[in-house]
Image (cartoon, grey):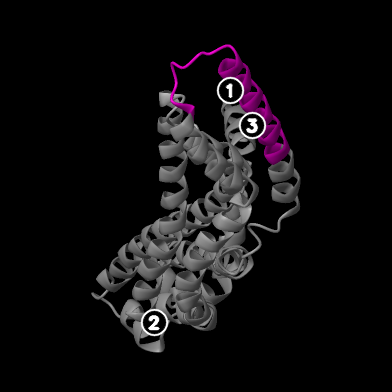
Amino acid sequence: MRKLVEFARKVFGWLHKHRSSVGVAVVATLLTLPRWAHAISLDRFVLNPFDSTALLLAGIINNIAAVIGKLMLLIIEMIIVPILGYNGFSSADIVDLGWSLVRDVVNMGVVVILIVIAMQTIVGYHKANWTQQLPKLFIGVILVNFSRTICGLFIDVSQVVMFTFVNAIIDIAAGNFAQMLGLSQFGEFSNEFIDKVNEAGTGIEAYAYLGSAYLQLALYLAIFAVLLLLALMYIWRIVMLWVLIIMSPIAFFLSGVGDMFKASAGYYGEWWKKFSGALIMGPLLLVACACGIVGQ
């Protein structure tokens, strides 16, 4: 009796620990039972219990896969499509506030550098060739105050390429995706399949159906992971472009003082590398997605 109580405690403890998975399995089973009961009669279940159980498991897996499929459509319609249509990079409130603050700080830094140059000129310090460096500094100062506009122009070019494919994906993605993956057919047993399962000696059909259900579930999990990763990458792109626009006054200022401070040229090159990478990443991913969807 004591062993039975300990075993029951272990079972309840395991169920409590994995309550989310158990809940999904229970819901999937309840959704599958009506179709399964219609498909397999009681006498056939008694005569062929293993094949009937395999069919029940296949139905449960199909219902779980159907839930994952609905989540995929939700990610496409509620997350990916709005993200692809986003175009308020330069006009975002956080960019407006952050860029203005950074620009003002950089302009004050320019004033400090000009004061240092004037003092060195007064005392006759001619180690640096200011006559050649000042024009580049002034160009950098001009670029600092127009850095958000310049970044916005480059982003607009990238977005034009993206929007070439966005409209097509918005029109066909959700509907074609559901049809392509056969979401409407999940959990349905054809009459021909039911007859084959109920026939003596053809129970292998149930195991074949169970194997295909496992493969379909694995495929859905892989596609779900890819869609989730795609959404996260585009969210990362938006945030990265916000940050790069905010920091653009510093980058253009460093490009103007590259001859005075050699290390600054490396920081400007790093900023430009990240900015161009974020611009190119969006269209490239979208072209790949569009080709994959249209090719189905």
Query: What percent of the width, then of the height, locates residue 271?
Result: 47, 40
Percent position of residue 20, x then y:
62, 45
| Residue at 38% in and 69% down | 287
Q: Distance between the residues labelled 1 and 2?
A: 89 Å
Q: Mark 3 points at which residue?
A: 110
- Label 3 SS: helix
Which residue is under mark 2?
Answer: 194
User: Is label 2 in a helix, a strand or a loop?
Assistant: helix
Crowding near the residue tagged with mark 3, few <14, some 14–19, many ≥20 C-alpha atoms within 10 Å: some
Q: Can residue 188 be seen in this view?
A: no
Sort mark 2 into few (<14), some (14-19) or many (20+) by Cα contacts within 10 Å.
some
Magenta residues, start to end: 102-130
Q: Which residue is drawn at 28% across and 68% down?
A: 208
In the displayed structure, would residue 256 be above or below residue 84? above
- The answer to whether 3 appears left or right of 127 in the picture is right
**On residue 25, which mark appears?**
none
- Image quadrant containing the N terminus: top right
Q: Which numbered dot is residue 117? A: 1
Label 1 crowding class (10 Å Cα cut-off): few <14, some 14-19, many 20+?
some
Q: Does 132 sit above or below residue 115? A: below
- Look at label 2 and name its amino acid: Ile
**Image quadrant in which you'd find residue 138:** top right
Quick one: quadrant of the C terminus?
bottom left
Q: Is residue 35 left or right of residue 218?
A: right
